[in-house]
Image (tube, helix red, strand yellow):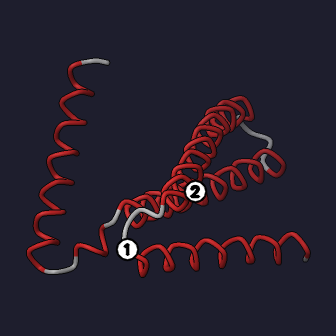
Amino acid sequence: MSKKKTAQKKLVNELRNQLFIHAERLGVREQYSPVVMEELSQDAVKKILTEFYMERANIEYELSMITSDKKENLIKLERLNVYIRKAEVLLERHNKKIEQLLDKNVGDEKTTLWALKKRYQSQNKKRIQVAA
């Protein structure tokens, strides 16, 4: 790992520790349990992935409708597909991490129940979309 990445990781860890300290002082430490933090990261990845899908749809529309400069659009589409695959892998990692944390019952009961409720709601939405 390069020095720059190591320095960035140290900075992020320091900021995370400061966040936990301030949350503890404010009495809201439960809102920053490992499960909740992982859920926040997962939500961010989902949002980014949605943006990627929208951009891919736009590029595919341009390819089908516009006859000019298809080569450039094909290059953009290829690059975007790589980013989409990376985001999907990252989303799967977050899913596995959340499953591990829930299996360990990390955090208090209230936080664990909140995470489970949120998880099952999103799974039910997926099932409804697939059925439609």
Q: Would you identify the image quadrant in which residue 117 lies?
A: bottom right
What amino acid is at disc 2? Glu
Q: Residues within 10 Å of mark 2 (few under 14, many from 20)?
A: some
Q: Residue furthest top?
A: 2
Cα distance between the residues tagged 1 and 2:
16 Å
Q: Position of residue 96 (x, y in %)?
A: 58, 49
- The numbered mark at residue 99 is 2
User: In the rendered image, which quarter contains the N terminus?
Assistant: top left
- The numbered mark at residue 108 is 1
Closer-to-camera residue (132/6): 6
Q: Residue at x 14, y 47 (%)?
A: 14
What amino acid is at disc 1? Asp
In screen coordinates, is 2 left or right of 68?
A: left
Q: Residue at x 62, y 47 (%)?
A: 92
Q: Position of residue 41 (x, y in %)?
A: 43, 57
In screen coordinates, is 25 left or right of 111?
A: left
